[in-house]
Amino acid sequence: MNKIFIILFFVIASKISAQNQRFIYEYKYIPDSTKVDSILTENMRLTIFKDHSEFLSEMKAKRDSAILKSSQKGNREIGTDLSSGNIRSMVWKNKNNLKNYLTEFIGMESYKVIDETDLNWELIDETKKIQNYNCQKAMLKFGDREWTAWFTTELPFQDGPHLFRKLPGLIVAIEDSRKHHSFQLIANYKTNEGTSVIKPFHLLKDYEVNRKQFNKKWNDFRKNPISSNEQFLLMNPQIISFKSYDENGNEIDANTFKRAGIEKARKNLVKNNNFLDLDLYK
């Protein structure tokens, strides 16, 4: 009987030690700098593991998890109630001075952008209480923006939303000086879930680049945008072409479909111009 209790003790202890810490942030942002009264909101999750942390949209994480579980069961249907959200970018932060990277998108192309930026925080002798946490103020210049952060040592994690990290405690709130982007901690709990960032679909490749290389590719696309279908064919030259149909089942002329795709890409560029990291997308 004693042996059973000892085994149960170690099983429970191992499960507790394997738990990861998750923080949910409310992200408010203005996608179009010409429409500052148009504010969007999306919940983001920061999960801290033993050797790294991940930051991505809560909606995207749940959808990706559902897709993964569905594919493992051989089922391609995940239901229509799971939205992928608006925020596609993801951040992977390693511990022990290893590479950090963020996943950014140009159209439908995914880029793994290696991040080597220094975060030169200025600690300010000012405190206030946020969400019942005693917080201290810190200032930072990052991504061609000036940021004000509030961190707490009551949560002993030198981490925060997006790429923000390396303060003496967890970032509870952070906002840029123009009030175009802000993150506010709204939940905190433990989880046994594994990593959130799943492998991309084999036809949607991942390209590893540095910030300078990404910026060049972004500007090339901005000057000459192409449709997502054309991007897909360029990424997969083994696929010669494919046909498109309207809602009535009629085949759409290839050139007409291509022009519509380019126009859609141009419109997206116009209405999504106020990136969190303006330096990366300058």
Image (cartoon, helix red, strand yellow):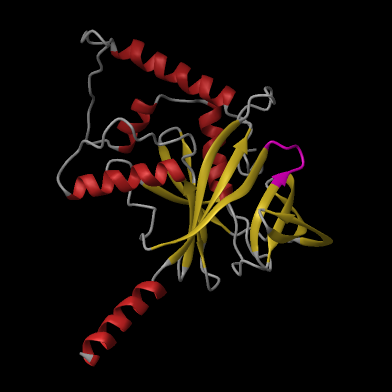
The span shown in magenta is 175-180
Q: Give 220 or 264, whichever is nearer the viewer.
A: 264
Q: Is residue 201 visible?
A: no
- Tell me if residue 13 comes above or below residue 89 in the rendering: below
| The residue positioned farthest toward the front in the image shown | 1
How would you classify the magenta stretch by its main secondary structure? Answer: loop
Image: 38 above or below 9:
above
From the top left corner, tell me how far across and down residue 144 is, in percent. Answer: 72, 44
Q: Where, quadrant-wise, is the C terminus in this rendering?
A: top right
Residue 203 counted in the magenta span: no
Residue 145 coordinates in the image, percent (x, y): 73, 44
Q: Most extreme residue toward the bottom, as rendered?
A: 2
Q: Farthest residue to the right: give it.
A: 125
Observer able to see residue 55: yes
Is 248 left or right of 218, judged from the image as shown?
Answer: left
Which residue shows up at 56% across the image and 40% down it? 216
Question: What residue is rendered at 58% in x and 52% in y?
Answer: 161
Image height check: is 232 above or below 213?
above
Q: Is residue 179 magenta?
A: yes
The quadrant in which residue 84 appears is top left
Residue at 61%, 70% in the rendered image: 156
In the picture, the quarter occupied by the N terminus is: bottom left
* 60 with respect to 102 (left or right): left
Residue at coordinates 22% horizontally, 10% vertically from top-left? 251
Residue toward you, 238 or 98: 98
